[in-house]
Image (cartoon, grey):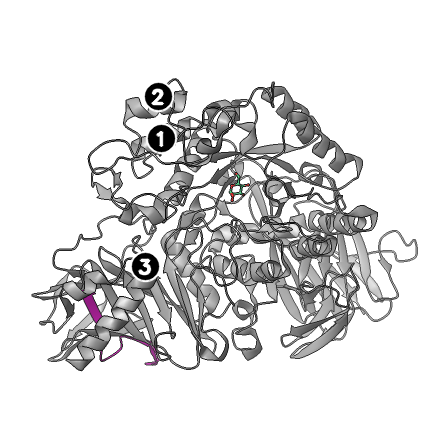
Amino acid sequence: MIRSVALVLVFGMACSRSGSGTSEFTTQQMWAIGNMQRPKQQGNTVVFQNDRGVARVAFVNENVVRVRYLPNGEKEHLRSFAVVDQKNAPVSPRVTTGSSSTEIQSSALRVIVHHEPFRVEFFDHKGRSLDTDDPSRGVFHVGHQSKVWKRLLPDEHIYGFGEKSGPLDKRGMQLGGASYTMWNSDTPGYDGSTDPLYISVPFFMVMREGRSHGIFLDNTYRTHFDIGKEQPDLLSMSIGGGELDYYFIQGPEPKKVTERYTELTGRMQLPPMWALGFHQCRYSYYPEAKLRAIADNFRKRNIPADTLWLDIHYLQDYKPFTWDTKRFPDPAKLIADLRKQNFRVVSIIDAHPKKEVGYHVYDQGIAGGHFVTNKDGSIYEAPVWPSMAENSPADSVFPDFSSSKTRDWWGSLYKPLLDIGIAGIWNDMNEPAVFNTATGTFALDVQHKNDGRPTDHREIHNVYGMLMTQATHSGLKQLRPEMRPLVLSRASFAGGQRYAAVWPGDNQSSWNALRQSIPMHMGLGLSGFAFVGSDVGGFMGAPTSELFTRWLQSAVFSPFFRAHTTFGTPDQEPWSYGKDHEALNRAAIEMRYRFLPHIYNEMRLASQTGIPALRPLFMEFPLDEQSWRNSELSMFGDSLLLAPVLWPGVNTREVYLPEGTWFDLQSTTTYEGAQTHTLQVTLKSIPIFVREGAFIFTKDQVQFSDALADKALRVDIFPANDSSKEYYEDDALSMAYKAGDYLLRRFSQHRDKEHIDIKIEKIEGEFQPKTRQLILQIHGLQGSPKTVQINGKILDKKNGKSFSVESNGTLTLPLKDSLESKEIKIQL
Ligand code: GLC
């Protein structure tokens, strides 16, 4: 009895933190999952049943187990918004049922299900226990809510949950723990303690002694996770409704966990190259003369940039799919002119058409039954930006993105924007955000059609933004099938990486927010959202010149790279902080452009594997204890370690380098790893270290990404006995790569005392890059080599043209780039 009272409190606390109130729990009966009878096997699923509900355990593949618990009276989870169709058929596990437990086993995992009471425990193939339900609690159910408690070991580190503030390791400092709610929320000016934020990803990774597994809770209702905060040795997950449905994902490498999680929920699409360039935004550039002046400034000042963004002031009274023709009298001409200057334009489309008869989106939406309704069937109306318009302010209505018919309709509305050359779409306010209400969002009883399975907002809220981006993404693909779409979204849910890049909303212009952006990007990345980047300089408030420069420098390898600020703040362009800072800011953006081939290559890998380009140290060095809690350093790909300066007024920066030899990216100075180095830094410093054996792909400086194609490809090769790297290219823009129009090559090296052998081999694809040079820069020689051979032919070193060796030991070898394989032998 005492125990069950304690549990009511624990349960109630979790639920009240997630905003549902506790009263429900005192009046409703709470029950434990209880004892189960011997299971039945139905296909690949093992089914347990008692008079309270049904539990099912199934192997999705060798490494992924799905566990479901459906209490009587709850809605079965029949369709997942997050999980995509799996390529491989589910495996049939070996099932052995004894008197008190059932063992379910694949080649990689063993699950033991205890019958009395029902508890699940996961083991790896070596018999190590990876995860288990807490023996005394297990699963409880009250009202519509269910909760499972799991063991949390003192040396387990917890990562992920997508867009969450706080340190990378959610165990916190001194195992203080953390608790997180999944409920998409518009949180302007949030700080390190704000939760929830805009995106919900109920996925986390557990790492212990360098070995990892993951858990994905596939439930779109408000969910809550407690990581050792309630009680240091317990991790709990609770759901606000529906079926308790989670996937256990085996690693043991952390990269494998994310790879398998994204096999389940899908991966980011390969973006066009321009989307990886520099983006300039503000709330808002208007009238059109202002936008033109911004474009002119970039080109006049030789600061590279690809994209300018139109925020809500281009719209007539903030109405999606309109133009304010006073501010922008001829959008088609404006966009065509900017295109001539090699700019692309992205425009914002929010989720809230204005309620206004005669406005085409409202009229069509009413006629087609596309808007969400109240319980009584009337259309739900609420204030968002159109309620703040200068002329005839009014409430908004909201598309029901849970209906595929509505998504198709919404997708088709982009046609006029694409017809005049808009390059990408920015979806905002899609948590969905609503003004002047206590909750900041729809009433919970707002009705959604949900493709024939009507439900209320409690189930759809967290996927509303993702479904909006699905509508946008497929609209763009249908309207312009040959082009890769760029969609940026503020709200999303697990799996939303399939449709849109994301940015973590309205951050502050503060050093804290800059520092916070690093673990947040890594947390999103390892949770599937690999295409991410925060507003450079911060959105709310105004950065000092130093903060703006440091932010820009820290974002040189941010997958999405956009400066943005709110309404009414001072100018926040790279030239807004005086000549000295303009030079520093230019240098940072120039660096981005030189490294675009490398960035593109890593982003393509992310689109293939789900492993984020921007990743925590522990993903590369899982056995290095120093990497487990590091929130300040990150890796870009497998070979660049980023150590941006994140504090004002400093002239040193401490950097921990994991084991191995490292090279300063800019000077190729050598550093030994497994120790912390103190670097001297100036305002110019962008500390980045190259891992031994790395291949780094760059091109000469350009002002916009379309100019890269015919530039020489430079490959810097850093010493290691053996290493290799694949390099990918295509037209950087279209969908032709899907039909084989790409080129994948492998660069590899082998070094010993007497030789350096380098091979370049074609692996796949027929893409023919433009005629250009391939310049190999082979680092780490000691003196001039005796001979250099290419495909068996000795180069004449006397005429000095064929290769050169600098005093720092770098051999430069310019070649004509061609698809033929090359073998370079350097005799030392
Ligand atoms: C929201 C967005 C912000 C945008 C503003 C106006 O606050 O997060 O990026 O500038 O709305 O559209």
**Mark 1 element type:** helix
Q: In terms of depth relative to the viewer, which is nearer, 747 or 109?
A: 109
Pointers 3 and 2 in contact (CB under 8 A)? Answer: no
Which portion, as a residue range, is magenta? 123-141
Q: Which residue is mark 1?
A: 408
Residue 601 vs residue 788: left or right? left
Q: Which residue is mark 3?
A: 223
**Label placed on residue 488:** none
380 to 277, vertically: above or below: above
Give the quarter of the image for residue 258: bottom left
* Disc 3 packing (10 Å; few <14; some 14–19; many ≥20): many
Cα distance between the residues tagged 1 and 2: 16 Å
Q: Is mark 1 within 8 Å of ligand 1?
A: no
* 127 in the magenta segment: yes
Quadrant where the N terminus is found in the figure: bottom left
Q: Position of residue 397 (x, y in %)?
A: 35, 32
Q: Earlier in the sequence, mark 3 or mark 1?
A: 3
Looking at the picture, which amino acid does disc 1 mark? Asp
Relative placement, left or right, of 430 versus 519 is: left
Q: Amino acid at mark 2?
A: Asp
Instruction: Using the image as rendered, state which of residue 483 and residue 570 is in the foreground.
Output: 570
Secondary element at image label 2: helix
**Of labels 1 and 2, the one closer to you:** 2
516 shown above or below 281: below
The spot of residue 103 in percent (x, y) is 20, 75
Q: Position of residue 679 (x, y in %)?
A: 75, 71
Give yes or no for contact between labels 1 and 2 (Cβ–Cβ under 8 Å). no
Q: Residues within 10 Å of mark 1 (few under 14, many from 20)?
A: some
Sequence order check: which comes first, mark 1 or mark 2? 2
The Cα–Cα distance between marks 3 and 2, rounded to whole angstroms, is 36 Å
465 in relation to 255, above or below: above
Which mark, by number, is residue 363? Answer: 2
